[in-house]
């Protein structure tokens, strides 16, 4: 089971490139596609889901070009797009049966599968309520259920936790972990904590290009020695922020405690500290944003 993305690019009107020279090979497990809004993640997801075609390069699923033979992938694909719409007057059971029919799931199998998924995503108590009465979290549960109707080998979820409360976000992360097993799961998000919780492989994306393809441990190693903490008066913070990449600030009685990503000591009295994945993310994005910087992928 292999998804191979080979030098894929996507050009829009006005010579705007959503992706450039993007290459990646994926096998079973959860990969976190991480980058800021507008980085090109959704463009890539749409190409992988055969919603749009690449301008350059190609994508293959188990050796088959998905542009030439899209049905090879579509038959084993589960997709939860960033904006997932529902029919507000249908209940969850009716809606899932409707989508199962569209996907070509045989009626007897659809009945079994819908009942199984209703339990899996925790919709049993509200399954007969109209979808128009569902909260954002409940709609996301319906979204992941529809993506799993055909028991997909490739599951793509695009910004799935945006708008969810903390409890729903944790529930969704746990569900993704349970589903990973023997399938390829791609989680596209700009939220570092979502990727940190579920992904064994992280791909950093910025301005349509891949900055890094690495394990969480490799990303953490890449920023070791470049994360600092220091304390300063509040009136120094504005000027300091203009010169440095700040991960967080906490105001205390002795001043503002600042976490900084920097290759050299940013402040008198600054002390090195252990990096987090958010530090690594800020480090690579800031390097790629620098005028003369050339981002290098991590081996």
Image (cartoon, rainbow, N blue to C red):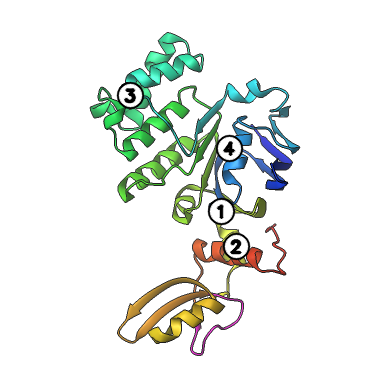
Q: Which mark is residue 285?
A: 2
Q: What separation in Å lies between label 4 and label 1 (alpha carbons)?
A: 22 Å
Taking the image as drawn, is residue 294 in sight?
A: yes
Element at badge 1?
loop
User: Which circle's residue, 4 or 2, is located before the other in the chain?
Assistant: 4
**Does 11 sit left or right of 264 as displayed?**
right
Circles 1, 2 touching at the beta carbon (< 8 Å): yes
**Residue 232 % position (x, y):** 42, 86
Q: Over which residues does the magenta segment extend?
A: 261-271
User: Which circle's residue, 3 or 2, is located before the other in the chain?
Assistant: 3
Q: What separation in Å lies between label 3 and label 4 (alpha carbons)?
A: 29 Å
Alpha-carbon neighbours of circle 4 within 10 Å: few (<14), some, or many (≥20)? some
Q: Which residue was labeled with disc 1?
A: 35
- Quadrant into which the C terminus falls: bottom right
Circles 4, 2 touching at the beta carbon (< 8 Å): no
Q: Which residue was labeled with disc 4?
A: 28
**Vertical comparison of 159 with 235: above or below:** above
Alpha-carbon neighbours of circle 1 within 10 Å: few (<14), some, or many (≥20)? many
Alpha-carbon neighbours of circle 3 within 10 Å: few (<14), some, or many (≥20)? many
- Residue at image coords 56%, 27%: 77
Is most of the magenta stretch helix, strand or loop? loop
> Which residue is most to the left?
125
**Does 34 sit left or right of 70 as displayed?**
left
**Is-magenta flag for residue 268?**
yes
User: Which circle's residue, 3 or 4, is located before the other in the chain?
Assistant: 4
């Amino acid at each position: 089971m292999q998804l191979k993305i080979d030098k894929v690019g996507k050009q829009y009107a006005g010579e705007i490139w959503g992706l450039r020279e993007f290459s990646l090979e994926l096998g079973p497990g959860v990969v976190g596609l991480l980058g800021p809004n507008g980085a090109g993640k959704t463009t890539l997801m749409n190409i992988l889901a055969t919603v749009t075609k690449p301008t350059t390069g190609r994508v293959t699923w188990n050796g088959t070009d998905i542009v030439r033979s899209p049905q090879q992938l579509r038959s084993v694909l589960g997709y939860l797009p960033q904006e997932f719409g529902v029919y507000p007057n249908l209940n969850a059971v009716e809606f899932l049966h409707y989508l199962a029919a569209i996907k070509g799931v045989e009626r007897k199998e659809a009945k079994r599968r819908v009942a199984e998924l209703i339990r899996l995503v925790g919709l049993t108590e509200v399954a007969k309520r109209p979808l128009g009465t569902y909260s954002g979290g409940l709609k996301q549960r319906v979204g992941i259920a529809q993506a799993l109707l055909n028991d997909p080998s490739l599951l793509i979820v695009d910004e799935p936790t945006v708008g969810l409360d903390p409890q729903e976000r944790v529930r969704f992360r746990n569900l993704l972990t349970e589903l990973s097993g023997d399938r390829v799961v791609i989680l596209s998000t700009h939220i570092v904590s979502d990727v940190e919780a579920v992904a064994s492989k992280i791909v950093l994306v910025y301005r349509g290009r891949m900055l890094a393809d690495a394990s969480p441990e490799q990303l953490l190693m890449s920023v070791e020695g470049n994360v600092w903490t220091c304390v300063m008066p509040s009136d120094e913070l504005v000027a300091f922020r203009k010169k440095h990449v700040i991960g967080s600030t906490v105001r205390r009685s002795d001043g503002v405690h600042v976490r900084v990503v920097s290759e050299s000591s940013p402040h008198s009295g600054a002390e090195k500290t252990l990096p987090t994945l958010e530090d690594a993310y800020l480090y690579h994005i800031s390097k790629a944003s620098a005028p003369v910087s050339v981002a290098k992928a991590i081996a």
